[in-house]
Image: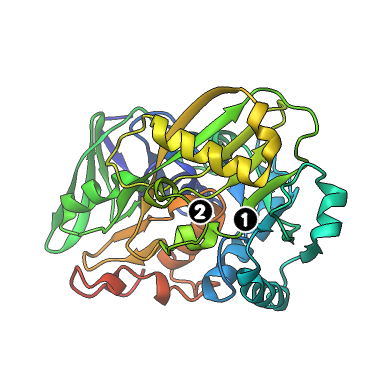
Amino acid sequence: MNKHENAEIVVIGGGAVGTAVACYLARDGADVALVERGEYAWGSSRRCDGHAVTYDSAPGYFSQFCKIGQDMFPEISRELPCDIEFEPEGLGLLVDDERDMETVLANYEGKKNEGVDVTFWDRDELLRHEPHVSDKVIACLNFNGDAKLNPMRLCFGLAELARQKGAKAFNRTAVTGITVRNGAVQSVETSSGSIATKKVVLASGVWTPGLGDMVGVKVPIRPRQGQILVTERLDGLVSKNYAEFGYLAAKSGKKRPGVTPEMEQFGVAMVLEPSAAGTVLIGSSRRFVGMDTTPHPAVMQAIAQRAKHFFPSFSGVKLIRAYAGVRPASPDGKPIISPTHVEGVYVAAGHEGNGIGLSLITGKLVSQMLRGETPLVDLAPLCIDRFGMNPPSLPSA
C-alpha cells in the first residue's frame, strides 16, 4: 500500500462476508479497496463447517432469504479462480420426539411452498438409507439442496476475483481509525497508510463493534462460541449431513425435552458432517464466553453424548481433535445489512452460523445498496434501526 490511497468504497474484513461484498462491488464496476488485518479467512471463516443451508430457519422471510443466498453459489462457483468444493449433498433433520411431528410437517409444507427441494422419510425409509440410526429416531425431513463447501477457498477465491475485477486488496493491514468530518466519512486509517474514501463497509464479524466505536455507531454483536469434534476415519457409519430437529429450538434458545442440563446449558444440538477425508465433524454448541476459542471438555462430552443418542455406533469411535470458533451473533440472530446514521458508514455483519451461506447474497445486496439500486430483497427487517441503539439510519447510497 502507498502511504496515501484512494477508493470509492472501503470494505473492512477478509472473511466470507467481507470478501463477498468486495467481490460483488468490483464485479459491478465500483472502485473498491478490501482491507484485512490478517490473512483472508483469518477469523471465524476458518473455524466453521462451511454450510450453505435452508434447514435451520422456519418458513418465512429469513427462510426465503437463505434460499436466495444458497441459489447464488453454482453461478459464482463457475466464475471463481479456485474450486470451492461446493457440493449440494443435502441435509436431513432427524426427528426423535412425536410431539414435534405437527411442527415438522408444517415446516415441510411451508418449505415446499417456498420452492425448497424437501422430502419426508418415515422411519422405514430412513432405515433404508441409514441403517445405523438410533431406534429413537422416528422420521427425517430432507433438505436436498443444502450444501457444504470449503470456506477458506471461498474467501480466497472471492478476494482474488475482486482483485481481477479491479479491486485493491490489502491484507496484513490493520485499521487503526476511521476519520469522520461533519458527519461524513473522509478516510480509513491503517497500519500501512491512509485510504481516502466516502463509503466504508464494516464487515468484520465479531470485530465489527470495535470498528463501529471508531465512528460512533453501536453495533450489537457478541461473539458466540461453537465447538466441533472430529472423528477418526470411518467407513459407512453415516452417508450424508444430518442435524436434529431440536437444533431449531436450540438456535432460538428454547428449552427442549429429553436433553441433559449440560446440553441445555451449552446449547448442544446434534449436527454432523462426513468429510471428504473420511472423518466426521460433529457439533454443535452455542455459548457466550467472549473471544475464547478453547475447546471445553464438558462441552465436548455433551456433544459426543448427543451424537450417540442419534447414532449409537459413535460409542466406539475415537476422536482425533476438537476445535472452537466464535460467531458474530446479533440479539435476534439475524444479520445486520444496513446503512447507519453516519453518512457513508454501512454494516454487513452479525450472520452468526449462517455467514458462509449468506455471504454471496450479502455481497450482492450491499453492492446494490451502495450503488443506489433497488435491492433484490427487502432489507428493512435487517436494518440496524431495529435494535434502537443509534439515531435513525440515513437513506442508503
Disc 1 marks which residue?
53
User: Can you give x and y, in whole percent of width and height, for residue 41 in the image?
Assistant: 47, 35
Decide if residue 76 is on the left or right side of residue 246. right
Describe the colour scheme in one phrase: rainbow
**Quadrant that contains the C terminus:** bottom left
Residue 233 or 254: which is nearer the viewer? 254
Q: Residue furthest left?
A: 182
Residue 110 or 187: which is nearer the viewer? 110
Q: Is any atom of residue 204 visible in this view? A: no
Decide if residue 149 is on the left or right side of residue 269. right
Q: Is any atom of residue 346 visible in this view? A: yes
Residue drawn at 74 percent across, 59 percent down? 142
Residue drawn at 22 percent across, 68 percent down? 341
Decide if residue 134 is on the left or right side of residue 13. right
Quadrant for residue 235, please give it.
Answer: top right
Quadrant for residue 141, please give it.
Answer: bottom right
Question: Are the residues flagged by discs 1 and 2 in contact, CB closer than 8 Å?
Answer: yes
**Residue type, mark 2 in image:** Asn
Q: Which of marks 1 and 2 is nearer the N terminus?
A: 1
User: Can you give x and y, in whole percent of width and height, for residue 376 in the image?
Assistant: 55, 72
Helix, strand or loop at mark 1? loop
**Residue type, mark 1 in image:** Val
Residue 293 or 342: which is nearer the viewer? 293
Disc 2 marks which residue?
354
